[in-house]
Amino acid sequence: MFQIWDSKCFGDAEKQIPTLNCIFPLFNNIVTGALVFGAVIALFFLIWGGFKFLKSQGDQKQVQGARQTITYAILGLIIIFMSFFIINTIATITGAACIKNFSFTSCE
């Protein structure tokens, strides 16, 4: 899932000093982490909305609030999954694997 920094990332292998080649793996890890974090938060709110719905006991105001929570959580999950889908579709159609990996220096 996360991209591992390779030896090309570091200028001096002994000192492990990162160079500008580390920007793309770092960016990939940040984007991947943010999308995973967003998906976990959306799933949490989906479960939380279900609990709110169960605890509403028929009160229309609480039921409406629970439905909104569930709706927004599902919309968040759809947006996250669509972003993965769009990036992978573009990479498949164009044959540019560097789009998925954010490694613009190794596009072939």
Image: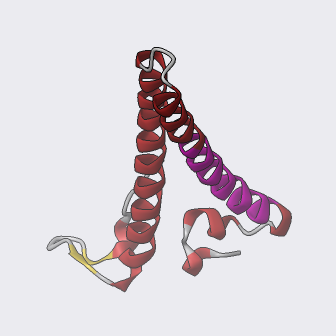
* Residue in the foreground of this view, choosing between 66 and 95: 66
Q: Residue at x 24, y 71 (%)?
A: 13
Image height of 61 relative to 20, above or below: above
Q: Residue at x 41, y 29 (%)?
A: 48
Quadrant in which the C terminus is drawn: bottom right
Coloured how?
secondary structure
In magenta segment, residue 42: no
* Residue in the foreground of this view, choosing between 50 and 89: 50
Q: Position of residue 39 (x, y in %)?
A: 49, 44
The range drawn in magenta is: 72-92
Figure quadrant of residue 101: bottom right
In magenta segment, residue 80: yes
Residue 26 appears left or right of 98: left
Residue at the left extreme?
A: 15
Asked whether residue 3 is in view, the answer is no
Residue 103 appears left or right of 54: right
* Residue in the foreground of this view, choosing between 83 and 57: 57
* Residue in the foreground of this view, choosing between 15 and 76: 76
Figure quadrant of residue 7: bottom left
Q: What main secondary structure does the magenta stretch of the protein show?
A: helix
Image height of 22 relative to 87, above or below: below
Residue 70 appears left or right of 17: right
Q: Residue at x 65, y 47 (%)?
A: 78
Q: Position of residue 93 (x, y in %)?
A: 85, 64
Figure quadrant of residue 10: bottom left
Asked whether residue 22 is in view, the answer is yes
Q: Position of residue 85 (x, y in %)?
A: 71, 53
Q: Residue at x 51, y 17 (%)?
A: 58
Q: Position of residue 14 (x, y in %)?
A: 17, 70
